[in-house]
Image (cartoon, helix red, strand yellow):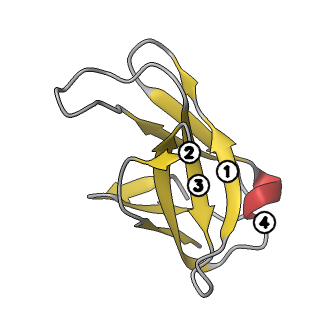
Amino acid sequence: MALSYLYDAIVASKGENTVISAVITDDDGITIPDGCALRLYDKDCDCMLHRVEGTFDGESWTFTLTNEQTKDLRGRYFYCICRHGESLCGKEPIYFM
């Protein structure tokens, strides 16, 4: 299964590397070039399962959840993107099939 998006929701395959790309801007629309990470939260206890540092290519960010990190996931979880530890958005759903 390929990674797919529906608005801010993501559908991914468990047990495979999940590569998520995002253009991250500030309130003025200026691209944020540093300090971004993706957090993955448990669906039941709101506990953070993983924190993945992003890489910036000059235009967009890439976050990779490894196959080891996703192998036991099934169903709905939540993710958010943070910068220097501060959330930049609310938690959005991510589904592993």
Identified by mark 3, the residue type is Arg
Specify whether 70 is left or right of 23.
right
Foreground of the two, 81 or 20: 81
Q: Residue furthest left?
A: 28
Q: Earlier in the sequence, mark 4 or mark 3?
A: 3
Q: Earlier in the sequence, mark 4 or mark 2?
A: 4
Q: Earlier in the sequence, mark 1 or mark 3?
A: 3
Pointer 2: what residue? 85
- Is label 3 in a helix, a strand or a loop? strand
- Is label 4 in a helix, a strand or a loop? loop
Where's the C terminus, which quadrant? bottom right
Residue 73 disc label: none
Q: Residue furthest top?
A: 58
Distance between the alpha carbons at the discs numbered 4 and 2: 26 Å
Distance between the alpha carbons at the discs numbered 1 and 3: 4 Å
Foreground of the two, 40 or 82: 82
Residue 51 disc label: 1
Q: Earlier in the sequence, mark 4 or mark 1?
A: 1
Pointer 4 and pointer 1: residues touching (CB < 8 Å)? no
Pointer 3: what residue? 39
Q: Residue at x 51, y 22 (%)?
A: 34
Image coordinates for residue 42, horizontal then vertical, percent: 63, 76
Residue 71 disc label: 4
Give the foreground label among 3 and 2: 2
